[in-house]
């Protein structure tokens, strides 16, 4: 069994062109000695410039992606090479981590790493390319795909973990954004949606719990 | 049931006096407009100045404490007010979060919050005081205390979750440091140690899994 995890429509992107000249972005770039085009969009720094950005509630939260990746990459399942992670972003890119790749726990180092990767310099362990969720799933070719969403059919995490671990090459799709729902084209690509709690949970909590349940089920095989 | 979680000997502290004049600390302070005494010790910034610090392998990792707190405070159990968190630090302080208090997901904001709290300005939601783990446990007065450590007796997380959730006021003690083991005085105060995996797991992975299992057991009551 190898589990694919797709963080879909993730709030991780470089500052979009329309914001390059906005004062908070220019200031951030000057302070860090980087061009605006080389900086991660970050709501905590660029909030005022994001107000007129489309879907701004789903964007500019690299901190969420960071914590979610830490929760995934810290699990025994991942450390054993049984998880493959893809960060599909709002802007239509995919950041694919080589198996067992660890990411910096320090946020500033993570930010620097992602800025380099999204600028085309991800090194040997991080591959970046353009893809929608639909295209990514066609490339992965999993034998089951389940998206996690409060809009899905109620299930329990142990049940879902068991179903995924029973396959050879399952794929879980988790929203990598702070608020809102999957876009229609993502919903269409994913197909089945499962709801694992009464309330919306943060992506990192979902990821931590799901990997744990898959790991437990896989160990019992 | 209310679960107490103590992150013990956590790698969260202000820069100690002996390092105030070291170049990386002075530079960090100048850049941020803060006195060295007001800055969190951070290995990613102050590494070269930490080499001669006692127990330096256990110190200066606020990033680990941050991720662990996010994993705890993002759980339904915590959101329902059924978890109380105490960050007991290497330097012998306790950072106690008021129930249901959320912490910033952005690391730089978390850092600023902790710097203020440890400097005596935690606001109404964060209380800071001096205490060892032993003193803290005497103050909490839990009806069971279990420390998590690879040095402990092997158990499974579901078993441990069940045992804790069966009590009214249980307490789990998790090491809030990156490497090494609990100090002898902590071991003595904690008493029972449980080992939940073959390998050492990061504090945030342990916390996420333990809270999840306690939550499941509590829900089944």
Image: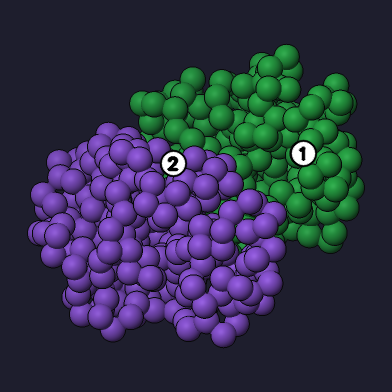
Chain colours: A purple, B green
- The answer for how far apart the CA atoms under marks 1 and 2 are is 24 Å
Q: Pointer 1 indicates a residue of which chain?
A: B
Q: Chain letter of disc 2?
A: A
User: Residue A203 falls in which quadrant of the image?
Assistant: bottom left
How far across and how far down the image is residue B64, in percent?
A: 58, 40
* Label 2 environment density (alpha carbons within 10 Å; few <14, some 14–19, many ≥20): some
Q: Quadrant of residue B27?
A: top right
Find numbered disc 2 in the image and state the secondary structure of the residue it sits on.
Answer: loop
Q: Is residue A110 left or right of residue B69?
A: left
Q: Which residue is mark 1?
A: B28
Of residues B50 and A166, the one nearer the viewer is: B50
In the image: residue B180, left or right of residue B158? right
Compared with residue B176, is residue A10 higher up or lower down, i.e. above or below?
Answer: below
Can residue B8 be seen? no
Q: Position of residue A77 (x, y in %)?
A: 29, 40
Which residue position holds label 2? A103
B97 or A181: nearer the eye? Answer: A181
Horizontal arrangement in the rendering, residue A205 relative to residue A127 (left or right): right
In the rendered view, does A133 fall on the left or right side of B23? left
Residue at 37% across, 52% down: A120
- Note whether residue B63 is visible: yes
Q: Which quarter of the rendering shows the C terminus of chain B?
A: bottom left
Quadrant of the frame with the N terminus of chain B = bottom right
Is residue A17 depicted above or below A71 in this figure? below
């Amino acid at each position: 069994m190898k589990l694919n995890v797709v963080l879909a429509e993730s709030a991780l992107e470089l500052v979009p062109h329309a914001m390059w000249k906005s004062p908070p972005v220019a200031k951030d770039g000057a302070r860090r000695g980087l061009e605006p085009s080389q900086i991660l969009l970050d709501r905590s720094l660029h909030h005022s410039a994001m107000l007129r950005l489309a879907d701004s509630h789903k964007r500019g939260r690299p901190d969420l992606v960071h914590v979610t990746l830490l929760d995934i990459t810290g699990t025994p399942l991942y450390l054993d090479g049984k998880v493959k992670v893809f960060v599909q972003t709002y802007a239509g890119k995919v950041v694919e981590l080589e198996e067992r790749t660890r990411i910096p726990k320090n946020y500033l180092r993570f930010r620097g790493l992602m800025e380099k990767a999204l600028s085309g310099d991800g090194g040997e362990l991080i591959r970046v390319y353009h893809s929608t969720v639909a295209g990514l799933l066609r490339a992965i070719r999993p034998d089951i795909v389940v998206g996690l969403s409060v809009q899905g059919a109620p299930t329990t995490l142990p049940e879902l973990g068991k179903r995924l671990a029973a396959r050879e090459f399952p794929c879980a799709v988790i929203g990598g954004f702070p608020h809102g729902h999957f876009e229609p084209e993502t919903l269409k690509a994913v197909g089945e949606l499962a709801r694992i709690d009464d309330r919306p949970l943060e992506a990192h909590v979902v990821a931590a719990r799901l990997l744990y349940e898959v790991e437990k089920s896989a160990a019992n095989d």
